[in-house]
Image (cartoon, rainbow, N blue to C red):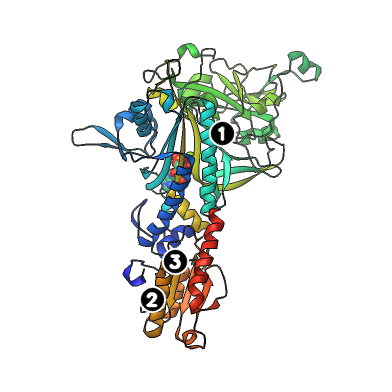
Amino acid sequence: MKFSQTFIPTLREVPADAVIVSHRLMFRAGMIRKLANGLFAYLPLGLRSFRKVERIVREEMDATGSLEIKPTVVVPGDLWKQSGRWDAYGDALMRLKNRVGADFVVSPTAEEAFTSLVRDELSSYRQLPLSLYQINTKYRDEVRPRYGVMRGREFVMKDAYSYHTDEASLDKTYQDMGRAYRRIFKRCALTVIPVQADSGAMGGSGSEEIMVESEIGDNTLLLCKACDYAANVEKAGCKSDFKAPPSPDAAKQAGLPPIEKIDTPSVKTIDELCAFLKTGAEKFIKTLIYRAVNVELDLSTAPGAARLEKRKPAPGAPELYPEAFFAVAIRGDLDVNEVKLAAALKASELSLASDSDVERLTGAPTGFAGPVGLHTLPLVIDLTVTAMNDAVTGALAKDLHYRHAAYGRDFEAWMISDVRTVKAGDRCPLCGGELYEKKGNELGHIFKLGYKYTKSMNVTYLDEAGKAQVPTMGCYGIGLDRTLASVIEEHHDGDGIIWPLTVAPYQVIIVPIKYEGAVKALTDSLERELEQRGLEVLVDDRDERPGVKFKDADLIGIPFRVVVGDKNLAADKPRVEIKGRGEKESRLVETAKAAEELAALVKAGLAELNS
Ligand code: ATP
Ligand code: MG
C-alpha cells in the first residue's frame, strides 16, 4: 500500500482532552478521530490494528468451541423488562422508542438478547452445554467518557454467553475462557493481571477480571507480596481477626469494666470523638445506617422485618424486599466496602440512609448510632468488630456515647460478615503475607452468572428424566478498543508507537529517500516481493523530506523500517537499511537478501507472540 493512496492524517499536535499516551498517539498517528464526546471513528490505519485484535479474539474464542453469531444491537425493551434490568441498569442504558412507541435499548451488553434466543431454541439437555459469542457494537451512555477509546460511549465488545445443565460444566467453560483470555492478551503482547472480582448479589459463584496495570486505572487491585493472591478491592478479603463471641463470664474474668454512658456534647464525627476522648479511631465502633434496594436475603428473622414489604418482581423470580434498612458496624479506622456489603445482603443497590431515616430508625440524629440496644434494625457487624471488647460507640441518643462496650456481652449481631475495604498493608487472606496496591484497567471479565437471567427470563430444558430444569449460565467479555489502546500504553516511546507484530497495522514500512529513478524501482520491486511472501507493507511514496517520513514512521510504529537511498544502491553491492522500530541502530542488508531476511524476522516475531 502506498502512503499517498491511503489516508493516514498524522499530526504533531494533540487536542487538550487527550491526556493519556494511547489517546494522544492514536490521534497523532491518524488512527482515530473524534466525532463527539465518547464517539470515535477509526481511520484506515486504526482499523487495520483493530481488525488484528478482532482476529486474535475470534481465533481464540473459536478454539474454545464457542460459536459466533450476530444478533442485533437494538434489542426489544421487553426483554430487558423481563430480566429486571430495564429499571435496574441505570442511566448508562440508552432506551429508545420506535415510531409506534415500542421500547428498545441499544445493547450495552447482551445477556437478554442471547438468553431470549436460547430460550426459544432450547428444549433438551442434549443441546447443552451451549456457548455462543458475538463481536459487536455496544453503547453505554457513560457519565464521563474519557481517555479516548479506553472509555468511549460506543465501543466493540466480544461477549460470550454459555448455558449448562450443572455447575461442573459451567466451571469447565469458565476455565476454558480464562485460558483463552490469557492467550489473547499474550498474543497482543499485553502484561495482564488476573484478579478475583465481585460476582454480584444475584447468585454468581465466580468472577475474574483481567487487568492491565495503569496509572489512570479505575480499579484498585490488592496483590500479595508473598503468594499469587490478587483481587479487585471490591472483592478483596484479608486475614481477619474473627473471634467467637466472648461469654459475659469471660468478659468479667478478663477484668473488663462494665459498659458506661458518657456525655459527648456536640461531638459527631469520629475525628471529633478521637480528639475528645484522646484515643485512636481503632477503639471506636462506627455504625452506619444503609438503605438497600431489592434485597433477596431472607429477612424473616431480622428485627423490624414485620414492617417490610415483600414482592416478586416477575413470575418465576425470587421474592425480594424492594427496600430495607440495615445498621452496619465496623472498627472506626476502617471503611465499609459497599460492593462487599451489597453482595452479603444480596441487594442490587445500596446507599447511606438519609438523616431523617437515621433519626426515624435509631431515635437519634446521624452520628450517634451504635450497636448497643439497637432493636429496630438488623445489625450487620464486620468481622473486626467481633474482636472488640472495650470499645467506644454511639448510644442512640444525641450527645451520648458508650465506652467499654464488648461484643457478645453488650450486643449481638444479626449477621457477621467481612465488609471492610482492604488496604495496602493488610494481610493476605490466603497466606497472611503483606498486601500492596496497584491501579488497574479492566480489559476482560469472566463471570459465572448462575441462574439470574435464566430464571427471570424463564429458560427451561427437559432433563434426562423428562423434567423441566433451568440452565445455569456464564458470561465473558473483552473490550476490543480498550485492548488495542492498552497495547499502545505498554508499547511506545517518546517518538511514537512500537507495535508488536501481531497487532501492527503493517509489518514493514519502506521509506525511499526520494521516490524516483532507481530508488523508486527498487522500492516497488521490494514491496512486490514482500507482499508475495505474505507480508503487509506500507510504502512512504510521499514527496516529503526524509526527516518528515522518518518521524511519521516512528510515530505510526511499524515494526520494521527499510530505507532505500541512492548512496547505498550505488555501492558495489547495493544495499538497503533495515531497522526494528524498537532498535537504535539500523543495519545494511544486500538488496537481494532484504525480502528474505525481513520475511524471516516477521515470521519469527509472530511465532514468538502466537506460541
Ligand atoms: P468498567 O468497570 O471499566 O466500566 P465494566 O465492568 O462495566 O467495565 P463489563 O461490563 O465487564 O465492563 O464489559 C466487558 C469489557 O468491555 C470490559 O472489560 C472493557 O474491556 C470493555 N468496556 C466496558 N465499558 C467500556 C467503555 N465504556 N469503553 C470501552 N470499553 C469498555
Ligand atoms: Mg466488569
Element type at marker 1?
Answer: loop
Q: Which mark is residue 337?
A: 1
Quick one: which residue is furthest to the top in this view?
306
**Do tag 3 and tag 1 residues touch (Cβ < 8 Å)?**
no
Mark 2 in CB contact with mark 3 (< 8 angstroms)? no
Q: Which amino acid is tagged 3? A: Arg
- Mark 2 is on which residue type? Asp
Image position, residue 334 (x, y; %): 63, 35
Residue 533 numbered mark, or none? 3
Q: Residues within 10 Å of mark 1 (few under 14, many from 20)?
A: some
Q: CA distance from mark 2 to mark 3?
A: 14 Å
Q: Quadrant of residue 139?
A: top left
Judging depth in this view, the residue of 528 and 1 nearest the camera is: 528
5 relative to 491, above or below: below
Visible residue check, residue 189 = no
Looking at the image, is mark 3 or mark 1 nearer the viewer? 3
Q: Residues within 10 Å of mark 2 (few under 14, many from 20)?
A: some
Is residue 433 in view from this perspective? yes
Sooner in the amino-acid sequence: mark 3 or mark 1 = 1
Which of the marked residues, 2 or 3, is nearer the chain's N terminus?
A: 2
Q: Ligand 1 falls in which quarter?
A: top left
Q: Please name the amino acid that badge 1 sits on.
A: Asn
Q: Which mark is residue 168?
A: none
Residue labelled with disc 2: 524
Look at discs 1 and 2 and give the one toward the viewer. Answer: 2
Q: Position of residue 453 (x, y in %)?
A: 41, 27
